[in-house]
Amino acid sequence: MKKIFLIVLDGLGDRPNIELQGRTALQAAYKPNLNRLVKEGQAGIMHPVSPGSRTGSDTSHLSLLGYDPAKYYTGRGPFEAMGLGMTVLGGDIAFRANFGAVDANGVVTDRRAGRITSGTDKLADVLSFSVDGIDFFVKAGVEHRAALVMRGKGLSDRITDSDPHEPGLKVREVKPLDEKGKFTADVLNKYLSMARKKLTDHPVNTERIREGKEPANELLIRGAGQAPTLTPFSELFGMKAACISGIPMITGICRLVGMDSIAVKGATGRLDSDFRAKFEAAYKTLNDYDFLIMNVKATDIAGHDGNPIAKRDAIQRIDTAMKDIDKILQDTVVCITGDHSTPCAMKDHSGDPLPILFSTGGIRKDRAKLFDEISCTEGTYNINSGDVMKILLQLSDRAEKYGA
Amino acid sequence: MKKIFLIVLDGLGDRPNIELQGRTALQAAYKPNLNRLVKEGQAGIMHPVSPGSRTGSDTSHLSLLGYDPAKYYTGRGPFEAMGLGMTVLGGDIAFRANFGAVDANGVVTDRRAGRITSGTDKLADVLSFSVDGIDFFVKAGVEHRAALVMRGKGLSDRITDSDPHEPGLKVREVKPLDEKGKFTADVLNKYLSMARKKLTDHPVNTERIREGKEPANELLIRGAGQAPTLTPFSELFGMKAACISGIPMITGICRLVGMDSIAVKGATGRLDSDFRAKFEAAYKTLNDYDFLIMNVKATDIAGHDGNPIAKRDAIQRIDTAMKDIDKILQDTVVCITGDHSTPCAMKDHSGDPLPILFSTGGIRKDRAKLFDEISCTEGTYNINSGDVMKILLQLSDRAEKYGA
């Protein structure tokens, strides 16, 4: 049985760029190592979730790891909370939240508290406490953004938002959508009322009012979602698994399925990340684990920035950083792909398919010679992301026989 | 409407072989007839069941014939019984069985009765009888192996094994797993008690004891499975269908769906099979039938043996044997593929996809030119085995229009 190293170059897929003479970032990049892996292995086209699906990183990573998002993606709440680096456990109820400004009558005057830029971490600090046996956790994000996580027995996400979604309206009482949501709505309303008091009295807000700014005196919550209870990856696939990721949300998903998260010094989840350090850490990790998923975020960032030169250069630096990958190739199945396309021309995720490569000792070599969106159509596969784990299991000689 | 000839070269797919300078057996084989069929037809890549699935011959043949194994594969019992050449009907309960040795206290001393090599056929002969309206059939296999089939009304596979799975333990009473299994467990316990007496008194065993060998005095049964009740192939597809197969299990599956089985003199299901005789029999059979599936086992045997030279040579001899296939091509859709890959380097089934070709008069000709795992990626299809029957129906002008 071999080990498995799944490398996800985030937002890898591209569309033609004028700045690159009509080529995608991958086509334009000098990438001898990626090309060699294709030449000495198999390639193909992979659709995130299914052909044409325009996926987020959350849904596509779930799918790549073998968890069908149609079954397990329970809305943005839990995944946004993970994205802020919060621990989310199966069964937790999580919400996207805003720090908003509310007047004396409970009417929202600004859903973003004057686009507050600092102090929300201090506000969040006083909002993590327990009510009626339920633990509440709040973490601040960028500007007015935050997330709320509820943990305890008997919780349900069948409840309404407190956020009225428009200024000039009163903060809403949370209501149950069915019998199961009743307890959650009750304890949440109690919590929000206590939180309101703590926020109103908080020095950050007395200071803001003194400065003539909108106070951040209400935690407006929306999009309740219950974190799915997922069969641990180790149980599902019989492998001891780890992740290396600079993106909290991806790390959160991997931890939700029971993987260990390996920290890498110099890995930032940004364009300046130390890719070499990530690969070196990966090779070391593979000594102790059967399965490693490594996410590299830089390609996605350049895509969102609409910067094809930066995207091409990031690919080139990633390629250089993996130059020693041959040393693990005999006994490891290496798979490289992305989670979705982030075309520079679009500055956002698209539903375009992605190239995918598989390489290991003794593998069939197919016709594909270069690692890009077009050349990989000459390869073996035309698959959905949900097929990847099964192919990895069979290439690593770990697949159970189905029948006799 | 055309006729259909589906040729399954068992375990056809391969991985690179050192002995063949890094080529698969198919790549290395001289196979002008297979190549001509590709050149004058369509080709592609087929995944048994789904991408990455590592299938047995049972599940993949069910799938190829249009019966989804996720719905109809009910465990190894019925398929192992078919594999011994037993008749298995929909609703029958079948078991894998061992002839084991048991002491006076009912404790298993050897689950394989000293790896008994002869006489089990004679033991099996006395074990086929009826109890309480239920017919029992036993057939001996290789060494200590056998299968048991129960036929009658009100049977269920919701019962436990009598085999304790380890020596030193008592033979277990069969117990129902739910209310439905109660009658089956009762009648089976009665049967096993009667069988025990017949085995103990059998001359084969008195002789073995005299020789100081372990007696084969207990039929240890495990893995109860109820044979699926399948819509007959003729009803499902409106075709009179036959099979030519040297492998009892494949013949059994074909009979289970109501096909006639055509015996061919010289067809052995081994490497020395008379392929020419099989093809001649096939052409004759196609005069009387609309659909013929023919399994050739030799490729799989060479794969399991880890012998790429033998696999290449088997392909070459099969190719030579089909040299007259053009004479049926105008009015018959010929499809050639495998049921799964059996790479010589692995000596077992893998989940690698297979090449597939379709040829007939008037068919579109695509880019693929050679019949092998790599060249066929240039063709039209990238499909799962469950798609094959639909493609065959449409190419033979037999498909119902879906819509108007």
Image: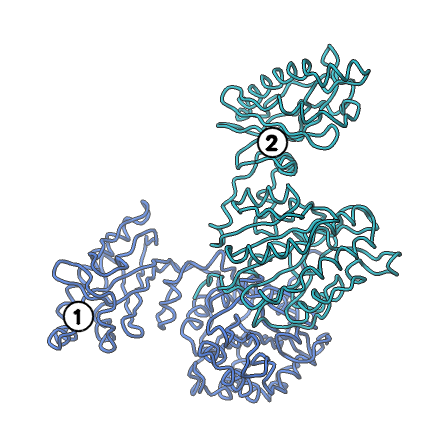
Chain colours: A cyan, B blue
| Mark 1 neighbour density, 10 Å: few (under 14) some (14–19) many (20 or more) | many
Q: Is residue A373 above or below residue A274?
A: below
Q: Is residue B43 above or below residue A144?
A: below
Q: How many marks?
A: 2
Callout 2 secondary element: strand
Q: Is residue A175 above or below residue B4?
A: above
State how far apart marks 1 and 2 are (Cα).
65 Å
Q: Where residue A237 sits: x, y (%)?
A: 49, 54
Depth check: give the residue in front, B286 or B142: B142
Q: Would residue A295 appear left or right of B272 to someone viewing this image?
A: right
Reading the image, the residue beneath label 2 is A94
Q: Where residue A24 sits: x, y (%)?
A: 81, 59
The chain under label 2 reads A
Q: For the point 74% across and 26% down, which residue is it?
A: A118
Instruction: Decide if residue B290 is in sight here.
Output: no
Q: Where residue A156 sits: x, y (%)?
A: 55, 29
Q: For the point 20% across and 56% down, which residue is it?
A: B170
Reading the image, the residue beneath label 1 is B215
Q: Is residue B2 above or below residue B157?
A: below
Residue kind at label 1, given as amino acid type: Pro
The chain under label 1 reads B
